[in-house]
Amino acid sequence: MRLFKKIGLGAAFLAALALPALGWAADPGKAKLTEGARFTNCAACHGPKAVLPPGHVSVVDEENRDCAMCHNDEKTGLRGKMPLSHTHLANDVACMDCHDRKPFAFVSTDRCRECHGGPKEVSALTRTEEDFNPHESPHYGNDMDCDLCHHLHAKSENVCGECHDLDRPTP
Amino acid sequence: MSKKRVDRREFMKISGGTVLGAGLLAGGIMSGSKRADAAPMPDKWDEEFDVVVIGTGFAGTAAAIDAKKMGAKTVVFEKMRLSGGNSTINGGLIACACSKLQEKHGIKDSPDLLLKDMVKAGLGLNNPELVRIVAEKSREVIDWSEEVLGVEYRDEVVHLGGHSVARSLKTKEGSGAAFIKPALKKLKELGVPVRTRTMVSKYVVDKDGRVKGIMIREGYKFPDAESGTVKYVKAKKGVIVAAGGFGYDVRFRELQDPRLGGDVTCTNQRGATADSLIELLRLGATPIQLCWIQSGPWGNPKEKGVGIGALFNLRNFMHGLMVDPATGKRFVNELADRRIRAEAIFATGHTCLPIVDSEGVKTYAHYIEKALAKGVVKKFDTLRDIATEFKIPWTAFKAQVDRFNRFVLAKEDKEFAKPIPKGDKPVEKGPFYVGFAWPKVHHCMGGVEINKDAQVIDLEGKIIPGIYAAGEVTGGIHGACRLGSNAFLDCIVFGRIAGQHAAKS
């Protein structure tokens, strides 16, 4: 398994997380998950229909792998708009790196922590002066399952946001 | 997955389709139960416990702690991924008659007065035996929460609507998590497994009518009723249903009260649905007062759920006045019970405005800057500015505020009989703070019938053996209207009673 570095996460991942969100012009539709998923092979999951808008640079080219090179402002940022599988694939983390058996089963939070660190490290990433910290909940503590909010194969959601207003999008 | 059910074909194969087999079939042995929709008796249980608790809120955790402490092998199942239900997100207020804090602050109270307040708000629909139990045990609950769980309460006593005196204690952290977190920790220390993502789908009932166990779905993904792996868990002494209310279940609540459709928002978490209640009703439990569903009058439409906007309104009702912006006048006792206030606000047809001044806002000092930043409370230099902003008829509004202030000084509200809190001052010193009030669905007073031992009662008035219920899933304690901070109290009272009785049985 290729690991991220625990500190200094993959550049594309970090950059994508730092930006606010904007949806694609094209609707990617319902993807069929497959072990053959590769960041450079949209059709493996999305089928033959194009998912990138016309004129989009080819993501097959190595130089275009860092989405944040272009998606780098409030209008174009991708944070919270794509299932996190894309961000992981962009950083060479493939299906079997998390799902260690077939058929693919629920991945426990312990697996996420192997790369992303434990509750303290994650909480430190999202602590700000202006807003509450979604990783330090007065109701649920700080060791909730990551995928309560952060979905790999669906759009992420904000569980705190069911009751509270949180200005930051959820990657 | 091994086959647990003894289905008809299997049985016929074993018995050879004999007269005996047919007779047993006719007698209902096949399903193991006379109760409609019960799960079939498995030929083998996957797990066995003495006491099975459903739900991880106040009632469920209290029940499990007491059951285990009495020696019962106990497990708790929670259908959602997060424990705590509505309890862990609540405002952390619990009613107590004759608390040490009341004594410290010179407030005279009694369990009889609490009982009287509950019955008055309940319009007398309260089950007399059950409501008395709750009123009499309030001090015992506070002492237990402090001694067993180390819960800490703030040095103040809050006066909530419908209570004759200030008697609501606030947890130090400000939410029910101050109870739930130590309760979950205590369960871990006691060796009681708490299993999330586990839905209790059906009860397994024997031919003698006793609930013998449950059918669960492990790995359940709310709200998919078919998700998860089916297993059967035996409950040798009893099943305790502490599954909460159905405030978030628009379909079921609208059936009971057509005014509460999807356009009325809700303070509850998503898991507050009617599934567990429905299973109890399928078992034959008597439904009590299901249409009495409470909307919280302090709901602030400028935020989701119950946030600091609602907390402001709650404080404001104590120390200020609320006006209808269309008339500039008060229209209800700001400290009436929730039903009276919510219905009065709904009747105006629009958001109403609770108002305090710089004196009245002091008890809310902790939150005010954040509330202003979020826009759930607005600040004005003068009353005239308020009238201008909200297009309130100025003459009527000014006259109303002056009148209200005379009542505060005289300590008697001649318009709406609001009990003027001790030490309150007139609303006259700017800046002024204005909240927004539009009710949100909050609590289900109705539920299944229980007796004083938390046993569930069937439609013929008989105990359904092997099953208990506690907390919001039960009905008859609060009647027409639950007083603020009484749910926390009721849940622990009957949670503990259920746990103790189940363990003893």
Image: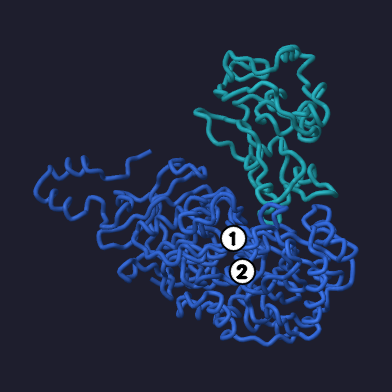
Chain colours: A cyan, B blue
Mark 1 and mark 2 in contact (Cβ < 8 Å)? yes
Against B501, residue A37 (above or below) is above
Query: Residue B425 occupies which quadrant of the picture?
Result: bottom right
Q: Secondary structure at mark 1?
A: strand
Amino acid type, label 2:
Arg
Foreground: B428 or B20?
Answer: B428
> How busy is the neighbourhood of tag 2: few (under 14 within 10 Å), some, or many (20 plus)?
many
Against B317, residue B214 (above or below) is above
Query: Residue B84 occupies which quadrant of the picture?
Result: bottom right
Mark 2 or mark 1, earlier in chain: 2
- Residue at (68, 16) in percent of width and height: A40
- Residue at (17, 50) in percent of width and height: B25
Percent of width and height locating residue B483: 59, 72
> How busy is the neighbourhood of tag 1: few (under 14 within 10 Å), some, or many (20 plus)?
many
Percent of width and height locating residue B386: 84, 61
Against A9, residue B46 (above or below) is below
* Residue B34 located left or right of residue B450: left
* Residue B293 located left or right of residue A57: left
Foreground: A91 or B284?
Answer: B284
Residue placed furthest toward the left = B19
Percent of width and height locating residue B196: 54, 50
In three-dimensional space, the C-alpha distance between marks 2 and 1, rounded to whole angstroms, equals: 10 Å
Quickly name the residue at label 2: B338
Circle 1 marks a residue in which chain? Answer: B
Amino acid type, label 1:
His
Quickly name the residue at label 1: B442
Q: Is residue B9 among what the camera can see?
A: yes
- Residue at (46, 42) in percent of width and height: B228
Q: Is residue B73 among what the camera can see?
A: no
Circle 2 marks a residue in which chain? Answer: B
Q: Secondary structure at mark 2?
A: helix
- Residue at (37, 57) in percent of width and height: B213
